[in-house]
Amino acid sequence: MATLRERLVGQRYVVSPSIWAEVRKSCRDELKILYGGGPFDDATWTKLDTFGRREVFEASKLNPAMRDLFRVHGPGLRLEGARGGELLVAFFLRPRAASLRRRLEDTLRQARP
C-alpha cells in the first residue's frame, strides 16, 4: 500500500494568486514541495529566515551570470532557492510536515500576495 507521501506526488494546488505548488518525489523520507511564481526576492527570503538559519552561496562572485543560492535550515524543514528566482524548493520532515507546510504557505502569502 502506498504511503500518503507517495500518493501526493504530482498534486498541484494554488497557494495564492501569484504562487502555485507541486508535490514532487524526494529521494529521502521527506515531503518535497516545489513553489513557483516568484520572483522570490530578498524581502521574501528575509521573512523565511524565521524558519531557521540562512546560508548564502554567492555564486555570482564566481560567475556574474549565476544567481546566489539561499538555503534555510530549520527544525524539520529545509528551504532552497535562488535570489530573485522563480522557484523555491521546500523539504519537510515528519511528523511536523503538515504544520510547517501551512506556516510556510502563510508566510509566502504575506510576502507575495
Image (tube, rainbow, N blue to C red):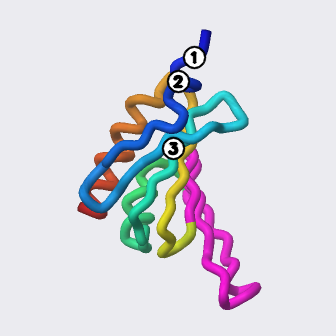
Q: Tell which of 54 and 80 is nearer to you.
A: 80
Q: Residue at the bottom extreme?
A: 64
Q: Do the residues labelled 1 and 2 touch (CB within 8 Å)?
A: yes
Give the mark count: 3
- Give me the disc on residue 3: 1
Q: In this view, does 70 lie to the left or right of 64?
A: left
Residue bounds of the magenta highlight: 54-81
For label 3, count other residues whose C-alpha is less than 10 Å away and answer few (under 14), some (14-19) or many (20+): many
Q: Is residue 79 left or right of residue 28?
A: left
Q: Tell which of 83 and 3 is nearer to you.
A: 3
Q: In which quarter of the image is residue 101?
A: top left
Distance in Å between CA atoms under marks 3 and 2: 13 Å
Identity of the amino acid at label 1?
A: Thr
Identity of the amino acid at label 2?
A: Arg
> Does 56 appear in magenta?
yes
Residue 75 visible, this angle: no
Distance in Å between CA atoms under marks 1 and 2: 6 Å
Numbered disc 3: secondary structure: strand
Which quadrant: the N terminus?
A: top right
- Give me the disc on residue 7: 2
- Give me the disc on residue 33: 3
For label 2, count other residues whose C-alpha is less than 10 Å away and answer few (under 14), some (14-19) or many (20+): few
Numbered disc 2: secondary structure: helix
Residue at 72% across / 36% down in the picture? Answer: 27
Identity of the amino acid at label 3?
A: Ile
Residue at 24% across / 58% down in the picture? Answer: 17
Location of residue 92 in the rendering, given as x and y in whole percent from the top left corner: 54, 36
1 or 3: tag closer to the N-terminus: 1
Residue at 47% across / 45% down in the picture? Answer: 22
